[in-house]
Amino acid sequence: MVSYNIIVDRRLCKGCSICVEVCPRKALKMNGVCKETGYPNPVLTGECVGCRLCMWFCPDQAIAVEKVTR
């Protein structure tokens, strides 16, 4: 079975929520404020299908999508 993990570099993320808006599965939501940056960060809350739209639309290149084989 293949699944996907979304990795957010919290040092680069500015909390713009573009990734949340472009996700066709609504698998991301904004979490509380990150202590290091002061911005909210996206977290995976649903099933990622690996489309990578969040990664491609991120203006700060703060997101990576990783394929996980189980």
Image: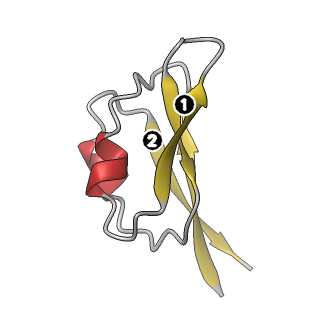
Identify the residue at horizontal 47%, vertical 54% (top origin): 28
Q: Which residue is under mark 1?
A: 9
Q: Quadrant of residue 53?
A: bottom left
Q: Quadrant of residue 49?
A: bottom left
Which residue occupies the extreme front position in the image? 32
Q: Quadrant of residue 9?
A: top right
The location of residue 29, given as percent across then percent down, is 48, 49
Label 2, secondary structure: give it: strand
State whether residue 17 is above or below residue 38.
below
Identify the residue at horizontal 31%, vertical 68% (top origin): 24
Label 1, secondary structure: give it: loop
Between 58 and 20, the residue placed more toward the observer is 20
In the rendered structure, which amino acid carries the disc numbered 2?
A: Ile
The location of residue 16, given as percent across then percent down, is 32, 30
Quadrant where the C terminus is found in the figure: bottom right
Between 16 and 56, the residue placed more toward the observer is 16
State whether residue 35 is above or below residue 8.
above
| Left or right: residue 70 compared with residue 45 | right
State whether residue 2 is above or below residue 43.
below
